[in-house]
Image: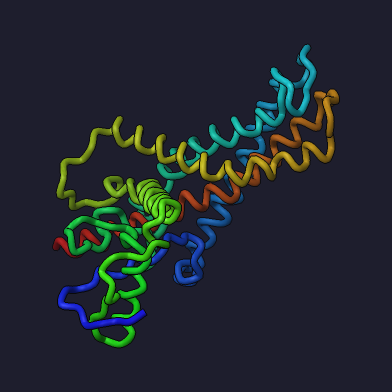
Amino acid sequence: MSLEIASGSAKPAPPPPILLFSRSIWSQLSRSQLIYLLVVQGVGSAILDAGANFGIATAMYRGSPDPVRVWELPNSLAGDAIVTIMIQGVLTWVIAGLLTRLDVKAERIEPIFSEHAPRPLHDLPVTVSGAASPLPDNPAAAAVADADNNNGSKVVPADPHPSAEVTSSSGCSTWACFRFLDSVVRWILCQGDFDFVAYKPKPEPPRHVRFFHSVLRGAMCSALIAIPYWPLCLIPLLALWHGNVNIPDWPGPQIYKAVMAAVLGFFMTPLVSMVGLLEAGRCRLADLQQI
């Protein structure tokens, strides 16, 4: 494809991808932050979640007149697993987020200052049209912008019309899906700025609105986690109790529910705390810029 010098400016390159588990972020963590995330939040949450769900399973299944089975209601372990993931995910987001905010404000833990932290929608680069764009409007523009950065000259394709591959319905639908998912994930990870930032250019939302946002963020995050985690939770169920067989009401269901909740708590709670520490670091830097 031939290239020619452009009179206008190309759109900026997209922002860095959202990677909470990026090596660049974890390499910046201090020993106290690692202990806080993995031991205090991770191990502590796993123990509490395991104990709470073991007790709930004991009350639900032991001595119940209805048989315990994998799929059949009312005592369905598969159904209990998906409900547990959703409810525990929301509670983890609300409680762990609150504890992290309190620890930051009490200076018991330092925020995470990282240039790779997720950025909210209003901080994303602005396109030529003036609208914030988390991703470029089409892949061809992104490729041209990369070529512009490499050789220092502003270039655009000679043909001003995008190719048929870019304008196809499947390509546009896929790109629109990426834009939507990027916006959703950024909203989940960056909506809690008002909980940290001291300089607020807009009026602070009421407390019940912030609580509703926290619950909604937790529900959306739980739904995203449930997509891969729930099928994984079904593997031991189907391996141990395949078919429509009655499951003993003690202690199998209790151990299963406790282990499932402990694994979820160990991985999700540090994630929620890291989101809070990254928010605190980003907003602390915003405060310093306003001084």
Residue 235 in which image quadrant: top right
Q: Percent x, y for residue 250?
A: 81, 26
Residue 75 in which image quadrant: top right
Asked whether, in this view, residue 243 is left or right of residue 200, the answer is right
Q: How many marks?
A: 0
Q: How was this image coloured?
A: rainbow
Q: Percent x, y for residue 189?
A: 39, 50
Quadrant of the snapshot with the C terminus: bottom left
**In this orientation, which residue lies closer to the viewer: 257 or 43?**
257
Q: Say if residue 182 shows up in the picture.
A: no
Quadrant of the snapshot with the N terminus: bottom left
Asked whether, in this view, residue 6 is left or right of residue 95, the answer is left
Query: Against 17, is 210 above or below?
Result: above
Q: Say if residue 265 shows up in the picture.
A: yes
Residue at the image position 35 percent from the left and 55 percent from the top = 279
**In this orientation, which residue lies closer to the viewer: 140 or 50?**
140
Asked whether, in this view, residue 214 is left or right of residue 78, the answer is left
Q: Percent x, y for residue 201?
A: 15, 49
Residue at the image position 28 percent from the left and 72 percent from the top = 159
**In this orientation, which residue lies closer to the viewer: 49 or 104?**
49
Asked whether, in this view, residue 33 is left or right of residue 278, the answer is right
- Residue closest to the far top: 65
Residue at the image position 20 percent from the left and 55 percent from the top = 131
Residue at the image position 15 percent from the left and 61 percent from the top = 290
Query: Against 182, is 12 above or below?
Result: below
Query: Against 167, is 192 above or below?
Result: above
Q: Percent x, y for residue 246?
A: 84, 23
